Image: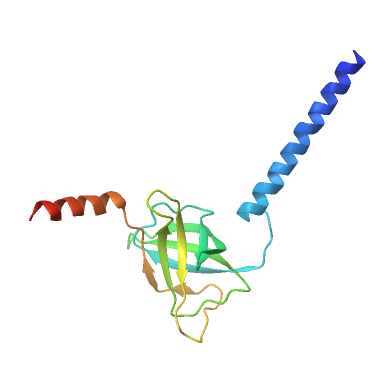
Amino acid sequence: MINRSVTEILIGAVVVATAIWFLYYTSTRTNIMTNEDSYNLSADFRSVEGVSLGTDVRLAGVKIGIVKALILNPETYRVKAIFSVKNAIKIPDDSQALISTEGLLGGTFLELVPGGSFDYLAPESVIMDTQGSVSIITLLMRLGTTSGAD
């Protein structure tokens, strides 16, 4: 009887330790619970297909922030993406924001392409030059209609 309760306590402790480790791991990998110094920027897109809250924001392939909000404007039908950028990264004011994918079947992310300006975006600024996501099905349909016309 005593051996059984000791075994149950040990198994319970392992389960609790595993749960704590899992919460720590997911919070550090997704930047959800960490209070990292960052500032917000935004950009308006025609389409943000594949992007959701927590999607990576990358510059030169390196994660520098996350998407914090997606707001649909009911008048223009454009989506305002609000995203964070690490304070250590200064974004030129003529930069471009793109919705990109990691290959044909890869995930989607918001990519920042820096411009050549020596002036930088202030917190809460809007990136004006954007390119929304491109649907692969739409591209394949266009390819099918153009090749059939020959």
Q: Residue 88's image quarter? A: bottom right
Q: Measuring 21% from the left and 50% from the top, which residue is drawn there?
A: 141
Q: Residue furthest left?
A: 150
Q: Residue furthest right?
A: 2
Q: Is residue 29 left or right of residue 148?
A: right
Q: Nearer the viewer, residue 19 or 124?
A: 19
Q: Is residue 25 left or right of residue 116?
A: right
Q: Nearer the viewer, residue 13 or 143?
A: 143
Q: Nearer the viewer, residue 104 or 132?
A: 104
Seen in the picture, residue 26 relative to 97 is either above or below; the reply is above
- Quadrant containing the N terminus is top right
Q: Is residue 101 left or right of residue 141?
A: right
- Quadrant containing the C terminus is bottom left
Color theme of the render: rainbow
Residue 142 drawn at (x, y percent) = 19, 54
Residue 123 drawn at (x, y percent) = 56, 74
Residue 106 drawn at (x, y percent) = 43, 50
Seen in the picture, residue 112 relative to 107 is either above or below; the reply is below
Q: Residue 13's image quarter? A: top right
Q: Residue 5's image quarter? A: top right
